[in-house]
Image (tube, helix red, strand yellow):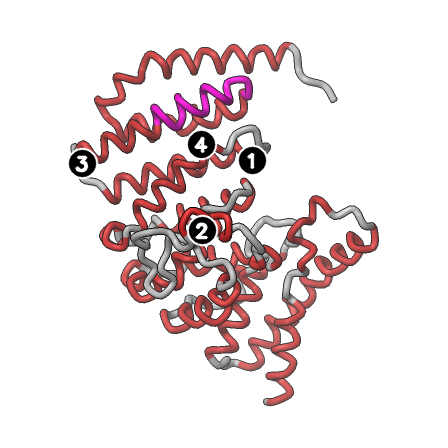
Amino acid sequence: MAADASSFQISVQKLKVPRDFSDYDKVEDADTIVRLEQWREQAVVHLTNLRGLVKSRKHLERDEQASLIFAVSSLDGDDSWISPGMKELADDAFEEPDVPLLDQILSIHLKPIFLANPHPSINAATGRKLPRPLGGPLGQHDFFEGQVWKSNPGLHNAISWCVRHIKTQAYQKLWHLVIPPVMTLLDDYEVRVKLRGVKIVFELLQAVPGELLQRTGVGELLYSSLKSCFNFLHNPETPTLFRVSVPAIVSLITMTTDPGTSQRFEKLCSILGDGIIGSVWLYGSREPETIEATLEVLPSLIDALGIASARFLKVCSRAVQQCNDELRVLLLFPVRD
């Protein structure tokens, strides 16, 4: 049994994603690229062997289950370190977790990684919004200094896995463990990282109680953070960011405001008027893919606004026509490398 436990830990350790995958697109050293490619090929073998070892053990202690899930869930995504077939193996590696197991994954494996970079607006002990940011005016600067958590590729996949498996009634108990890492990703200055945070927030909103968002003040933090996505223009991932963030923020607003109230109306109008029209369409008007992305998500905003959307119909109609004209030009005169 001791030998099996030792083999189990070694197999789990072999699935730890190499740090160099954090900036895989920027790696130029040939030896490093070869090493990473070899790890990706071998990871499928290690994952297959680990599944067999788990089945032969029949029973795993809770700490072993937590180690297993943390390692394997890092491979449950579409990142550069994940090869074809790996995700399917990762999806089928474990059963539905209970609350104590999720608590162990979040508290033992995830929380320590973020301790060096506490979110300035979140009370790490409660998951509540702080009355004033940590560190004062320089708190945000300190938050972006020495982001050691970025040296752990696959971290976002592990967070996402936990969020997808938290039941509505369990959020109260796990709140202080979930919110700090989610907000850390969501408020990052890199578009690729912020996009990961937005995707996780969208997953979180599928089950989190709206009352909990309001009571802890996190709903307002999420609203501000999601709205800030409209400032991230002129990036290859900007269109994807808008396609994910707008449905998330509409869902958030409908969960945390009452129908027909001025609060819901003002927030939705701010997203459409200040965010999309006043920011994206104004400063990203020469980027058809970005404009097209906002037009794709526009129906959800219009539907949420209802009759109040009439005040925006003229400018929306003009934007649709402009986008059609831009796309027509690109089709007739495609940009060549």
Q: Residue furthest left?
A: 260
> Is residue 88 shown to the viewer in this render?
no
Q: What SS does tag 2 mark?
A: helix
> Is residue 181 shown to the viewer in this render?
yes
Residue ID for mark 4: 230
Residue ID for mark 3: 259
Q: Position of residue 301 (x, y in %)?
A: 32, 29
Marked residue nearer the N-terminal end (3 or 1): 1
Q: Is residue 198 above or below residue 284?
A: below
Is 274 included in the stretch rendered in magenta?
yes
Q: CA distance from mark 1 to mark 4?
A: 12 Å
Q: Nearer the viewer, mark 4 or mark 3?
A: 4
* Amino acid type indicated by mark 1: Glu
Marked residue nearer the N-terminal end (1 or 2): 2
Q: At x 42% / y 38%, what residue is drawn? A: 245
Q: What SS does tag 4 mark?
A: helix
Q: At x 55% / y 21%, what residue is drawn? A: 287
Q: Nearer the viewer, mark 2 or mark 4?
A: 2
> Magenta residues, as a range?
272-287
Marked residue nearer the N-terminal end (2 or 4): 2
Magenta span main SS:
helix
